[in-house]
Amino acid sequence: MKDYDFLVIGSGIAGLVYALQVARCGKVAIVTKSSLLECNTAYAQGGIAAVLDAHDSFEQHLQDTLKAGADLGKKEVIRAVIEQGPKLIQYLVDMGTDFTREDGHYDQKLENLSLTREGGHSHRRVAYAADSTGRKIMESLVVQCTKCPQIDIYEKHIAIDLITQHHIMQNHGFIPGISCWGAYVMDNATNEVEIFRSRKTMLATGGAARIFGHNTNSVVATGDGMAMARLAGARLVNMEFVQFHPTSFYSPSGETFLITEALRGEGAILRLADGSEFMHNYHPQGCLAPRDVVSRAIDTELKKRGDKFCYLDATAVPKDILLKHFPNIDEKCRQYGIDFIVEPIPITPAAHYFCGGILATINGITDIKNLFAAGEVACSGLHGANRLASNSLLESLVIAFNAGNHPSNLDDVDFPQIPPWRQLDVFNENEWVIISHNREIIGTIMNGYVGIIRNRRLLKYALQRMENIYNEINNFYQHNAVRPEVVETRNMAIIAIAVIRSALIRKESRGAHYVVDYPERDDAQYLIDTIL
Ligand code: FAD
Ligand code: SIN
């Protein structure tokens, strides 16, 4: 057994910020299922939103967030997160994050930060580091964590299950007042499962967009934290609101990468195959309308024409801006034979972000005692029905920081006797197809039946099929030695079911959830969260 004061599951921005805060009051373990840098944070391009310009205001950022979220966001949460923005951007700068500066000269002050614009923002308020913002943030936080003597880092270790009363008590039914005492964690190299015992556990496992076959996410985004919390008895909230990013690179092979919204912020235009613009037919903000509107518009136009992709045309943006601000996109497009300075980029929408997640407060507190959640895994109430661009890094940063400074981190905990993981000797290779095959099918069903434009009949079919898939995978999980792929695929099925169930509960269209049977918003009945 490994014994720590704090167990942090996940090494994205949320996990690392929490770890750095609590390292001041105890020993910390960070477990992360791939390498330290493999996470959605590291792929973030556009930037991090905060009120940093004298002509901008907290009130305007609040209004933009609320509006993008179709009024479902919680005003008090939005205000609290936004007001902490400037202070915590300063924190990132102090940690060493090298944001792009107006004059190219690095200093510790915020005044000189260059700000870009993204969809739904009424101001330039997105701080960025060229088109690799997330990577720069990760690099600075990783340096701080690796040099901190209080922090031990376990790469290629996957958390399988939270340790709660469910593991301690025999023949339990419903158990009120669940506590968390750490997690069972598998070393991917040896398949050994060990107890990581901790006074506090932080779930910072990120999102779940990998349940959709076509997505922008890191391979790690399989919804593990959401599934573990659900199985332990925590509530999931607003899982139907899956945000599709309008512009992922289209290639016939299906390989993809994100084309940042900041490119539209600098003037790039969406065009159909015949070269025509179309976004002003859908929204007064045109190409810079909120993301849900743009993705739906593209989906509608593609279906109308039977096309697989349309174009993002940046050729009117000055070449020096393109090369300075978007070197990563330039390089990636060139790998596919596209020179985005002189020709349009083929794009299509892709699943991108989970607005819902584990119900958590502004301090990351969940339904389960001693368990925090922060970042994309959690739902704090900031985003409502659709996230405003670049508000996710901000939310992850603020809530992880708050959790790390919460007084309960100092609480003493009485630990029960924790049983070892019951590892089975059998592993039925012949039935591995249950995992490999179903993993692919989950992605296909979610894309086809639970995509940008939904209908209730298809949602019901999807639910039936997903429940069968879950039963097959769970049966394999129960009767075979545990493996990372099995854990992930089971989690993916659990989260897919949560998305579909939530989508069926909400009989209206709002934000990222659009269902043709109920195309309008229904504030009288549905200006409420969907809680599982
Ligand atoms: P992540 O950074 O995804 O980290 C999750 C961590 O948990 C990983 O280390 C993973 O390995 C680990 N993990 C998961 N499951 C387990 C397990 N079972 N055991 C152990 N470890 C586990 N947002 C913005 O605000 N601005 C942007 O410009 C922006 N651009 C984006 C671009 C792309 C391509 C993508 C995919 C997302 C973007 N987002 C952006 C969203 C944003 O990056 C994420 O929401 C945010 O980084 C989430 O941070 P996190 O710490 O919660 O999770
Ligand atoms: C992007 O750069 O377009 C992604 C920004 C985000 O997801 O907030």
Image (cartoon, grey):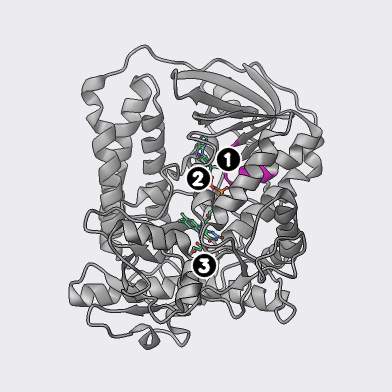
Near mark 3 (Cα within 10 A), the count class, few <14, some 14-19 or many ≥20, is few
Does the closest atom of ligand 1 sit within 8 Å of the Cβ of label 1? Answer: yes
Q: At numbered mark 2, what does the secondary structure look like: helix, strand or loop?
A: loop
Between circles 2 and 3, the one closer to the viewer is 3
Near mark 2 (Cα within 10 A), the count class, few <14, some 14-19 or many ≥20, is many
Identify the mark at residue 324; answer none if there is no mark.
Answer: 3
Which amino acid lies under the numbered mark 3 shown in the image of this protein?
A: Lys
Rendering coords of residue 317 (x, y %)? 44, 79
Does the closest atom of ligand 1 sit within 8 Å of the Cβ of label 2? Answer: yes
Q: Say above or below: 450 vs 484.
A: below
Q: Say above or below: 348 vs 27.
A: below
Q: Say above or below: 394 vs 291.
A: above
Estimate the spatial distance between the alpha carbons at disc 2 and disc 1, rounded to whole Å: 7 Å
Of callouts 3 and 1, the N-terminal one: 1
Of callouts 2 and 1, the N-terminal one: 1
Q: At numbered mark 3, what does the secondary structure look like: helix, strand or loop?
A: helix
Q: Which residues are magenta?
A: 9-17
Q: Is residue 341 magenta?
A: no
Of callouts 2 and 3, the N-terminal one: 2
Residue placed under numbered mark 2 in the picture:
39
Estimate the spatial distance between the alpha carbons at disc 2 and disc 3, rounded to whole Å: 25 Å
Near mark 1 (Cα within 10 A), the count class, few <14, some 14-19 or many ≥20, is many
Q: Is residue 13 magenta?
A: yes
Residue placed under numbered mark 1 in the picture:
11
